[in-house]
């Protein structure tokens, strides 16, 4: 998520009563979780074992709850509760705004777009030329939909990220979802799909991709161009699907992995690790199809082998 204007790090230090380490002349231009950070962003960590990873990320400003050595070209703000500072900045710059009308007066809809009855379009949504949004679909705040996009009925696009901070007492506190959903040109989305916006980064559906019915896309997922996904696919948050990937029906993909360009995952597979592109995968956990079939064949022989085993 980007700020409307850069924020000087010394102003942040003063506001949050923080100890400022490193370059006090820097300015923050945005805020993001560690998986999505870019130069200029604020990131945070409240666990010393992750300090090194956060400080070595692309983030320019890092919120920590203990002092640490600051790398060149960065600034550290030491605060009692980095999560609270991080979350408060997102809430300030992307405040919650409930829908008060079926179509917000602050949505931008191209005159050639077709919007069927029952569609709800929140504030700061943009919909491009010749796009078609079918009945009873919800388009959440800050969603960007390109040209020639077809979104079927009863979809939820831009719902909140499933992302919670576990507190010391074992309860969970919800993060404010400050990210967006970006649907590029010539995307088709079937009926009854759910696509979460990012926590502070973007969920992206690449140009030309086609999604069947009843698909779930988690927060911050990036899907490449010309991907094909059959019904009941589920993709965990922050996973990256490269161009021209095919996921057949009921494929489940865990969070924070990558599926390489041109990969094909056969129906019912469970993807639990990063997969190389250009290959076909099957099973749970998903493996290259020839290896998986050999494994299945070997398992089928076990009863006969056990019967022959000396007693």
Image (spheres, rainbow, N blue to C red):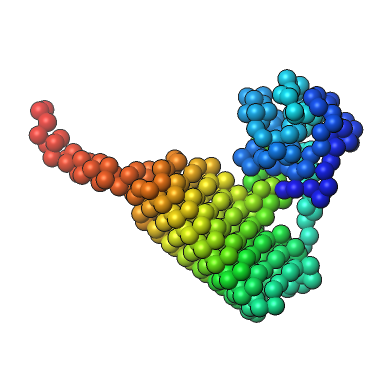
Residue closer to the observer: 45 or 145:
145
Q: Is residue 252 left or right of residue 167?
A: left
Q: Residue furthest top?
A: 69
Left or right relative to 273: residue 152? right
Q: Position of residue 254 (x, y in %)?
A: 49, 45
- Judged left or right of residue 90, residue 237 is left
Regarding residue 87, the answer to whether it shows in the image is: no
Please give the count of numbered marks on the rendered protein.
0
Q: Position of residue 121 (x, y in %)?
A: 70, 69
Q: Quadrant of residue 14?
A: top right
Relative depth, front residue between 27 and 13: 27
The residue shown at (69%, 71%) is 120
When the figure is inspected, residue 141 is found, relative to residue 172, above or below; the finding is: below
Q: Quadrant of the C terminus?
A: top left
Rendering coords of residue 264 (x, y %): 38, 53
Seen at 67% across and 61% down, the residue is 143
Percent across and percent down for residue 77 are 79, 29
> Is 124 left or right of 187, judged from the image as shown?
right
State whether residue 155 is above or below residue 39: below
- Choose between 164 and 194: the one closer to the eye: 194
**Position above or below: 188 against 52:** below
Q: Quadrant of residue 146?
A: bottom right
Q: State the residue at coordinates (79%, 53%).
A: 95
Q: Quadrant of residue 302?
A: top left
Q: Is residue 240 visible?
A: yes
At a point 48% along the width and 53% down the height, the residue shown is 243
């Amino acid at each position: 998520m980007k700020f409307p204007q850069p924020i000087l790090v010394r102003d942040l230090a003063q506001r949050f009563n923080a100890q400022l380490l490193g370059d006090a002349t820097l300015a923050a231009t945005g805020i993001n979780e560690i998986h999505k950070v870019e130069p200029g962003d604020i990131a945070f960590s409240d666990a010393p074992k992750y300090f090194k990873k956060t400080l070595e990320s692309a983030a320019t400003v890092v919120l920590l709850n203990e002092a640490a050595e600051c790398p060149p070209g960065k600034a550290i703000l030491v605060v009692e509760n980095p999560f609270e500072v991080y979350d408060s900045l997102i809430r300030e710059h992307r405040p919650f705004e409930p829908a008060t009308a079926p179509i917000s007066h602050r949505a931008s809809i191209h005159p050639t777009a077709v919007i069927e009855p029952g569609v709800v379009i929140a504030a700061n949504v943009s919909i491009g030329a010749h796009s078609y949004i079918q009945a009873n679909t919800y388009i959440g705040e800050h969603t960007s939909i390109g040209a020639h996009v077809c979104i079927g009925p009863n979809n939820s696009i831009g719902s909140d990220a499933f992302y919670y901070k576990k507190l010391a007492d074992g309860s969970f506190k919800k993060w404010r979802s400050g990210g967006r959903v970006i649907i590029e040109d010539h995307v088709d989305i079937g009926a009854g799909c759910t696509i979460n916006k990012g926590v502070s980064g973007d969920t992206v559906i690449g140009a030309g991709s086609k999604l069947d019915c009843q698909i779930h896309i988690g927060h911050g997922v990036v899907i490449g161009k010309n991907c094909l996904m059959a019904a009941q696919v589920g993709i965990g948050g922050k996973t990256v699907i490269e161009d021209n990937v095919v996921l057949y029906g009921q494929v489940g993909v865990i969070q924070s992995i990558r599926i390489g360009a041109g990969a094909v995952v056969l129906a019912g597979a469970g993807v639990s690790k990063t997969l190389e592109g250009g290959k076909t995968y099957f099973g749970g956990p998903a493996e290259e199809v020839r290896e998986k079939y050999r494994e299945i064949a070997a398992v089928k022989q076990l009863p006969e082998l056990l019967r022959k085993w000396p007693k």
